[in-house]
Amino acid sequence: MREPSTTYDPAQYERPSVTVDVVIFTLRNRELHLLLVKRSRWPFEGFWALPGGFIEMHENLDDAARRELEEETGVRDVYLEQLYTFGEPKRDPRTRVISVAYMALIRADAHQLRVSEESTDVRWFPVRELPHPLAFDHDQITAYALSRLRSKLEYTTLAFQLLPEVFSILELKDTYEQILDEQLDKGNFYRKIKEADVLEETNLTREGRGRPTRLWRFKPERGDKQFVFRWREDRNDDRDSATAVTPTRKED
Amino acid sequence: MREPSTTYDPAQYERPSVTVDVVIFTLRNRELHLLLVKRSRWPFEGFWALPGGFIEMHENLDDAARRELEEETGVRDVYLEQLYTFGEPKRDPRTRVISVAYMALIRADAHQLRVSEESTDVRWFPVRELPHPLAFDHDQITAYALSRLRSKLEYTTLAFQLLPEVFSILELKDTYEQILDEQLDKGNFYRKIKEADVLEETNLTREGRGRPTRLWRFKPERGDKQFVFRWREDRNDDRDSATAVTPTRKED
DNA sequence: TATACTTAGTGTGGAAAATACACTATATAC
DNA sequence: GTATATAGTGTATTTTCCACACTAAGTATA
């Protein structure tokens, strides 16, 4: 068909269901975790799955993801990014379900989570110790999310979104190391982060054995921006980018 | 809800329609073009739109995109990549329609297109001279695709997918220049492309005024691979998929 | 045959960026 | 004081990038 309306009237078209599934990352004890919920019924009863649900007819996709996130964690105003849409016909044995996958990063100190630590049906799992297999194609989705997170860390400052409001530079470095699974040079890290000019000094410190730790926060005006901040040259599977480029004419 | 099945039975859930829209790029006269179809009925009658259509219940998303592509162009076996899913509730005035956008790159010599040059309702447009506005949110989708294409060229060898089976190195360089809108150094280009080791020499040449042009092909075993191949370090202005909300924070 | 023309490269020096690692500085606990 | 931890700075080396000059080769045509 040449265009949607030529052959089908969308009002009568046989329709798949559409869900959003959210891979929610956070740091706990400096280790990267993600949230899973245990399914209580068929299909995949007893398996762990990503939190998600059907989109409502009036809400847009981002809002649906935000809603699911909030229902599960009680957290609002976090970093949220659409990842990819998974639509294998048999991914859900009940009926055709297409899932728009999102990734959310929530701060370590934002744990007014509804997820109680004792809850057996909703839990944080370290990404290195995920139950396997997960329900549906959620193994694939989490793998994709992890890959996207890693590759984005290489050229953006996304790691801030996982740290508490205030943090030390070594904590930030540690976060990068955790997620990239790679050691970084302390001196070079300081230089790069300073040069990137994304940190704002606070007058807070944290005292302990040695010299008190100086605490910083992410510069508010850059809180929702992403920009190049490459730690290393490397493969990245996916680097998505912007809307709106007005091409200018180029003569030869 | 904690999981999809808790509250809703997907079999009875009120469902949006799901379409795929495909941004089909090709080179014509060394200039980047994309394919648009003119709508013949409400909504957006007379406006140009991306080719696309409803997904069928049995086919997966990639196949749906491939099908639309083939219906429109008669071309199979091309580079195809899922871009992003657009789902604003009002993007289609008829009903809720969620569109999974794809990008396709087709070779310049693959033009057994069903698109006849004279056809008035299906046409190739140079990306610098797109009609405006397009139907639905297709301006946004094309801008996104163009941006993704440009940023991918900076670190992959995707440009091969737009060239004929065999091509000269200067043609390849010209393709990069066209799409990135930037002049590249000939010597450095030779070095980089050789070093990347993705070209296979053919014994073909093309004769003309001067020394015959040596023709190459993309190494078959890498034809479907992507890997790092950075031409320049650059930012990409992400105003993108990332829907981060800046946590509003009161200063003391 | 010569020379003009075109593609096809190579050589090279300087600039910029990445990297490794040694070094200094500061504030605290004990 | 000394030990210890964070918080940096200095610097030499390597690596990559980049601009640009230069050489090479095969064909057409004057």
Image: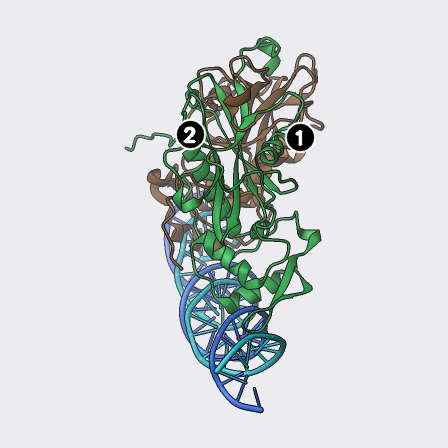
Chain colours: A brown, B green, C blue, D cyan
The N terminus of chain A appears in which quarter of the rendering?
top right
Chain where mark 2 sits? B
Q: Quadrant of residue A98?
A: top right
In the picture shown, does residue B49 fall above or below A97? Answer: below
Q: Do labels 1 and 2 touch, CB within 8 Å? A: no
In the picture shown, does residue B96 fall above or below A225? Answer: above
Give the Cα separation between the discs numbered 1 and 2.
32 Å
Q: Which residue is mark 2?
A: B137
Residue type pointed to by label 1: Asp
Q: Quadrant of residue D25?
A: bottom right
Q: Which residue is mark 1?
A: A139
Q: Residue at x 67, y 52 (%)?
A: B222
Give coordinates of residue A131: x percent, y percent: 69, 28
Name the mark nearer the viewer: 1 or 2: 2
Residue type pointed to by label 2: Asp
**Circle 1 Cα neighbour tier, 10 Å, few/some/many (<14 / 14–19 / ≥20):** some
Nearer to us in this view, B148 or A80: B148
Which residue is farthest left?
B252
